[in-house]
Amino acid sequence: MRQIDHTTIKHVLISRVDAIGDVVLTLPMAAYLKQLLPGVSVSFLGRTYTKPVIETCTAVDEFINYDELKNLPADEQAAFLKRKNIDAVIHVFPNKHVAAIMRQAGIKLRIGTTNRLFHWHTCNRLVKLSRKKSDLHEAQLNLILLRPFGLTEAQSLPEVIDHYHFECKTPLPESLANNLLADKFNLIIHPKSHGSGMEWGLDNFAKLINELPSEKYNVIITGSDKEKALLAGWIKTLPPTVVDMTGKMQLHEFIAFIFHADGLLASGTGPLHVAAAAGINTLGLFPSVRPIHPGRWAPLGKKAGYLESDGGNLDGITTRMVMQKIDMWYNNKFVINA
């Protein structure tokens, strides 16, 4: 594949207008672009609710809000993009409308995949990329779209992790910081997934929480506003020392809270990937079934890991298995480093 003349590309737009976890695993692309194209400006087209995640990446220079863009009159959308002086767009998440307006805006280099029919007439550089059949991680698959810029080899997961450039930019309000205890291991448990991952089940989480010594662990339950109602009755059955933070934080606050916590446990959902990128202890729970297995969606971070069930559900993951991982985290903080 013919590489791009670096001197002609001054502004690249990454387009990924889907969920939080998907966006997190796309962010390393920004740092890679800055390596491949010295001096380039990198923008990211995302949704309103993913903005706090995208702005946590120091390699992204500007966030462009797709929700605001698509609400403009049709004849103004391309004009808005033209004013951004974008030289190249990378369609990481295929979106027919996004692809069409990028072409209308006259962006000179438009990179998409060969397996989307609409890319054949909206993009002028196509990359062969089959996610379903690949054994690569989602973050590695995203980087295949950088082949036109010279990134011709698959990147190792440690290399991808080094390109997160994830940084907490929001001060943690005192009202939230007070829920974190210096003399205990602050463990966030995020039991729901908004349907993005297979869930372990509230009974399993309850059993685990009841086995965690309250003198060692400060257990914090998190969830969105919608999940707050689903979890309210269940939380009442947990030990009184458990901290209920469901529906109490906006995303930018939740990201800051994660940065200041010690560990997070969840299935394959957005906060899992945020925690991994933030560098805290992270444990994801996954089934063995494609395409939601950990080979594709495991959290990536220097302190991140996962447990994989031996089938199409999470029944094979026991509380004992999870406890062993969490106890290791505790020992690393309070025993080994004491």
Image (tube, rainbow, N blue to C red):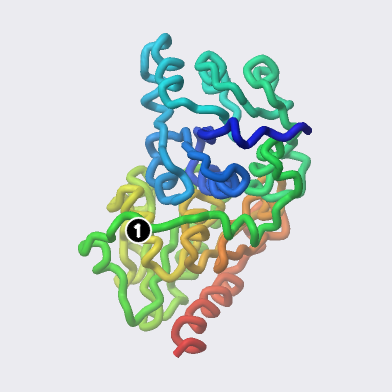
Amino acid on which the number 1 mark rests in the picture: Ala
Quadrant containing the N terminus in the rendered view: top right
Q: How many marks?
A: 1
Q: Is residue 231 left or right of residue 10?
A: left
Residue 293 seen in the figure: yes
Q: Is residue 90 left or right of residue 116?
A: left
Residue 218 is situated, as x and y percent measured from the top left of the image, at 36, 73
> Based on the displayed image, in which of its 4 quarters is residue 318 positioned?
bottom right
Residue farthest to the top, as pictured: 75
> How many residues crowd around disc 1 within 10 Å: few (fewer than 14), some, or many (20 or more)?
many
Q: Is residue 327 left or right of residue 262?
A: right
> Based on the displayed image, in which of its 4 quarters is residue 5 positioned?
top right
Residue 48 is situated, as x and y percent measured from the top left of the image, at 38, 35
For the residue pair 316 and 135, the one nearer the viewer reads as 135
Residue 186 is situated, as x and y percent measured from the top left of the image, at 39, 72
Give the SS element for disc 1: helix
Residue 196 seen in the figure: no
* Figure check: 51 above or below 163: above
* Figure check: 166 above or below 71: below
Q: Residue at x 28, y 52 (%)?
A: 248
- According to the picture, the residue beneath numbered tag 1 turns out to be 256
Q: Residue at x 34, y 50 (%)?
A: 252
Residue 9 is situated, as x and y percent measured from the top left of the image, at 57, 33
For the residue pair 26 and 236, the one nearer the viewer reads as 26
Quadrant containing the C terminus in the rendered view: bottom left
Q: Residue at x 54, y 28 (%)?
A: 87
Residue farthest to the left, as pictured: 175
